[in-house]
Image (spheres, rainbow, N blue to C red):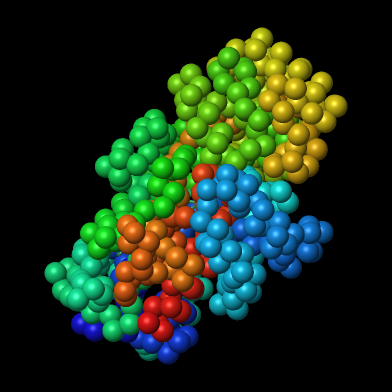
Amino acid sequence: MDTDVLVIGAGLAGFCASLEALAAGREVVLLEKQPEVGGSTVLSGGAMAFAGTDVQAEAGIEDSDDRLREDLLRVGEHRNDPALVEAYVEAQLDTWRWLREQGVRFTSVQLGGGQSVPRSNRVDTRQMIGALAERAGASHRFTLRTGTPAERLIREGDRVAGARANGEAIRARHGVVLASGGFSRDEVLLALFAPAQRDALRTGGRGNTGDGLRMACAMGAGLADIGYIRGTFGTHPDAGPEQLSIIHAIYKGGIAVNRHGMRFIDESVSYKIIGDACLQQPEGLTFQIFDQAIMDLSVPGVATSDMRAGLEDGRVLQAGTLEALAALAGIDPDGLHTTVARYNADAATGRDMAFGRDGLSSHYGALRAIGTAPFYAFPSTSSVLATYGGIAVDSQMRVRDAFGAPIPGLYAAGEVTGGLHGAAYMTGSSLGKSSIFGRIAGRNAASA
Ligand SMILES: Cc1cc2nc3c(=O)[nH]c(=O)nc-3n(C[C@H](O)[C@H](O)[C@H](O)COP(=O)(O)OP(=O)(O)OC[C@H]3O[C@@H](n4cnc5c(N)ncnc54)[C@H](O)[C@@H]3O)c2cc1C
């Protein structure tokens, strides 16, 4: 079978790449390993990091390319590839508009980890993938093959010329785009690249087992950011591997404590950093503690901000006093009482003396005292739900070999790639990069 552009993986990056290659007039074959499309994208919280959107403007939030760049670099501890950060910043607002043109609906905006202003532009991820799949499916030049895992890339001379799937060779006249997601469901690669995450939960698409990483490495691809894989704090300990059960009451003013009732970190930092600190606590188990004033900030339907839904389904615990809450959750009551009293006194002055917290997230927003009954606890641990390091690419999404040179014919986008995030992760930049970089990969593969 021959085509112009072969795309491997039907998540957000794969559909964005396919649509751009179709827009360039090419024929596209999109392979998906699972019986259905969507990958980790449809399981996700749907927070997309775009700066300067209408949704932000309507909420009175001022944001800009410069602010976004600064946040990405600060959170990434300047270990990000600056060329990828620049590529993201340059194309982000255009991609936001483009997604809307494809029929994707943005509903609200929230404050996420590592964001200096609320920048998590929310989508319903199934609506997004549905809209993109419908657009692609409307083209007679598009073929989607589900239940068809790519197994190996095919090389002809120094060029990647296609892939083998179900024993069949599929040749791509212009380029191959790897968009096969990360490896949050692959124990071998996690043990190799993220041994510190041994005790973290795993969440993600069933097909996200690092196939693209392996196929690219077999072609000589280099790696980027692979040592910085971290879990996400705020995951309920009973969450299943394909279940989004994350609440971030901390970014609305809550605190995080361990079983002794002790805080262990500045809760305004990236939830990846908090995730690592959480794993160091007894049993790797902690609790987000908040009060009725914070509960009243619940956003219905937005998983990570919908504390009320958590209360209704029993994941959030409620009690009339802190002592009763501690008893219910199995936290030391004296420890919790002392911690909250100390934190509330500090909150009144605007600066937490224990860990230096000075905002809700990344210096944004004023600290809130936890004082209005009833009180709430959300049991929280850390989960590897995406692997932020991966294949090395340049700003055109050409896969780079171990020495930095592009491998002809091979492109990659989305979670399978590394280099954008650096040492840690700002909320929304993963779906953001899948869409922005997916488009770039599709366009460049089409014109190769
Ligand atoms: C619970 C959860 C919450 C999250 N929340 C957010 C959030 O709010 N904001 C954010 O920015 N990020 C979030 N993420 C991360 C984000 O969802 C992913 O990083 C992003 O969706 C990856 O998109 P992708 O297109 O690269 O990969 P995916 O959407 O995972 O798609 C990859 C596809 O490739 C397929 N595939 C794999 N191997 C092969 C093969 N050999 N052949 C063919 N197909 C193959 C897979 O089956 C899958 O369908 C979250 C992730 C999870 C799990």
Q: Residue at x 23, y 68 (%)?
A: 153
Q: Residue at x 74, y 59 (%)?
A: 63
Q: Residue 34 sits in which quadrant?
A: bottom left
Q: Which quadrant of the render holds ligand 1?
A: bottom left
Does the rendering let one see residue 181?
Answer: no
- Where is residue 170 shown, x and y percent of the image? 22, 77
Q: Quadrant of the C terminus?
A: bottom left
Residue at the top extreme, as displayed: 334
Does the rendering let one see residue 271?
Answer: yes
- Where is residue 333 shown, x and y percent of the image? 64, 12
- Where is residue 278 shown, x and y percent of the image? 52, 28
Using residue 272 as the reference point, say whether residue 133 is left or right of it.
Answer: left
Above or below, comparing residue 300 to residue 433 in the picture: above
Q: Residue at x 69, y 41 (%)?
A: 361
Using residue 178 as the reference point, say whether residue 2 is left or right of it.
Answer: left
Tell me how many marks there are.
0
Above or below, comparing residue 209 to residue 358 in the picture: below
Of the pair 45 and 97, the residue shown nearer to us: 97
Using residue 125 as the reference point, say whether residue 370 is left or right of it.
Answer: right
Q: Residue 188 sits in which quadrant?
A: top left
Q: Residue at x 55, y 36 (%)?
A: 273
Of the pair 9 and 75, the residue shown nearer to us: 75
- Where is residue 404 shown, x and y percent of the image? 37, 61
Residue at the left extreme, as displayed: 167
Above or below, comparing residue 170 to residue 50 in the picture: below
Residue at the right extreme, as displayed: 349
Q: Quadrant of the N terminus?
A: bottom left
